[in-house]
Image: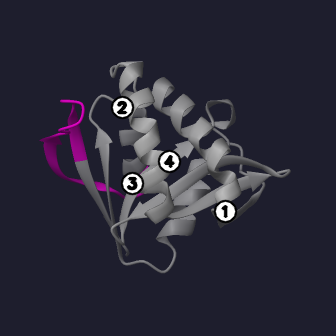
């Protein structure tokens, strides 16, 4: 794996258009089992309600946001997305390691059919807590947990 070269900084309101672009394109690519209309109809809620309240950090290389991670409800990862054209470069890992620093526990939900993401989180120390149905899509998802140490 190529190491990510860039920096991680707090999200700024001016990052919103780029973060939303990444969210939509990465959602479409990773979740082909969910109709695109779901993502389009959910985007305004994410942009206006969730993103402003989340604790979001962005990965920036050469002045361009290439990925982001959003914490909601304290220690729950509500989003970890990398621009599809930048995936496989260690950006997701760098964002996750940045998030894990100084925390004892993290949780997240990931669609069961998104095997690539499930494998990524397992490789970073997350374990399955429960399987459930996401009410918004009807898809099976895993609730995963990471504990320090």
Mark 2, secondary structure of its residue: loop
**Residue 12 image label:** 1
Q: Which residue is mark 4?
A: 47
Q: Are marks 1 and 3 in contact (CB under 8 Å)?
A: no
- Residue under label 2, please give it: 114
Residue under label 3, please give it: 78
Considering the numbered disc 1 on the image, is that residue within a helix, a strand or a loop? loop
**Residue 111: horizontal and vertical position, in percent?**
30, 36
Q: In the image, which is nearer the foreground, mark 2 or mark 3?
A: 3
Residue shown at the point (77%, 56%) measured from the top left? 6
The residue sitting at 39% across, 36% down in the picture is 42
Quote the CA–CA distance across marks 2 and 3.
15 Å
**Which label lies toward us, 4 or 2?**
4
Q: Are marks 2 and 3 in contact (CB under 8 Å)?
A: no
The magenta segment is 123-142
Query: How packed is label 3: few (under 14 Cα within 10 Å), some, or many (20 or more)?
Result: some
Q: Earlier in the sequence, mark 4 or mark 1?
A: 1
Q: Are marks 4 and 1 in contact (CB under 8 Å)?
A: no
Q: Position of residue 48 (x, y in %)?
A: 47, 51
């Amino acid at each position: 794996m190529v190491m990510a070269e860039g920096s991680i900084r707090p999200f700024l309101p001016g990052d919103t258009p780029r973060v939303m672009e990444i969210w939509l394109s990465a959602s479409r690519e990773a979740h082909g089992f969910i109709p695109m209309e779901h993502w389009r109809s959910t985007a305004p809620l994410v942009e206006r309600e969730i993103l402003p309240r989340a604790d979001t950090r962005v990965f920036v290389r050469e002045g361009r946001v290439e990925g982001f991670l959003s914490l909601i409800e304290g220690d729950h990862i509500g989003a970890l997305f990398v621009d599809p054209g930048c995936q496989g470069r260690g950006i997701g890992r760098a964002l996750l390691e940045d998030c894990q620093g100084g925390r004892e526990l993290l949780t997240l939900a990931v669609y069961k059919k998104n095997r690539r993401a499930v494998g990524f989180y397992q490789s970073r120390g997350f374990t399955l807590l429960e399987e459930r149905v996401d009410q918004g899509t009807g898809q099976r998802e895993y609730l995963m947990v990471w504990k320090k140490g």
